[in-house]
Amino acid sequence: MAHGGEVGENEPMADSGGPREFTTWDGEPVSRERPHGATTVVASRAPEGWRYLLLHRAHHGGPAREGDWAWTPPTGSRKPGEDLTACVARELREEIGWSVSPRPVVTGDVDWAVFALEVPWGTEVVVDGEEHDRFEWASFAEAQRRCRPAELAASFLTACEASGFR
């Protein structure tokens, strides 16, 4: 990967699952400039303790999908030229129907930014039905177990620790 915050024209970046390099699973373009997208860890104080919003990916496997990237916090790729905070707001609106402004946790000199958001317990979640087919509010241990691969688990832990979500 090129240094200085951009991916070189012929250099690979992390696979976004698209049919071509620098595209998403559904063919949408992904920014070649870093960060390429963001994850937002959403936490809520349930009566039994902290719970974390995880979305189940419906594409590439359907309801039985398991393994890497099957369960994630709200996450999305940044479009070319899109401001990072605009990307996060758009993804939250598209994936769960919320118009909110999460707090940046890690945004500089990274491939994937991390944001955090605390919401009241019982906040309505409406999944998009195309990219995600369901959601769950998981305990810390369960969310950590489901967030795979390792870089997703690390982003989850970083947001929780930086935001006091434990």
Image (cartoon, helix red, strand yellow):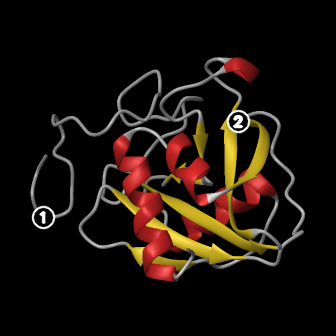
Residue at the spot 57% in from the left edge and 64% down from the top edge = 41
Amino acid type, callout 2: Glu
Residue marked by disc 2: 131
Residue at the spot 46% in from the left edge and 21% down from the top edge = 19
Which sits in the foreground, 152 or 74? 152
Which sits in the foreground, 5 or 133? 133
Residue marked by disc 1: 4
Query: Position of 128 compared to 14: left or right?
Result: right
Mark 1, other Cα within 10 Å: few <14 / some 14–19 / many ≥20:
few
Mark 2, secondary structure of its residue: loop
Image quarter (top left, top right, bottom left or bottom right) of the C terminus: bottom right
Say whether disc 2 or disc 1 marks the residue closer to the N-terminus.
Answer: 1
Q: Is residue 164 above or below residue 57?
A: below
Q: Is residue 73 visible?
A: yes
Q: Which mark is residue 99?
A: none
Examine the image and state in which quarter residue 139 appears: bottom right
Query: Position of 71 compared to 110: left or right?
Result: right
Q: Is residue 81 visible?
A: no
Amino acid type, callout 1: Gly
Instruction: Give the Cα distance between marks 2 and 1.
Output: 32 Å
Q: Is residue 139 above or below residue 148?
A: below
Residue 95: % across, % down: 73, 51
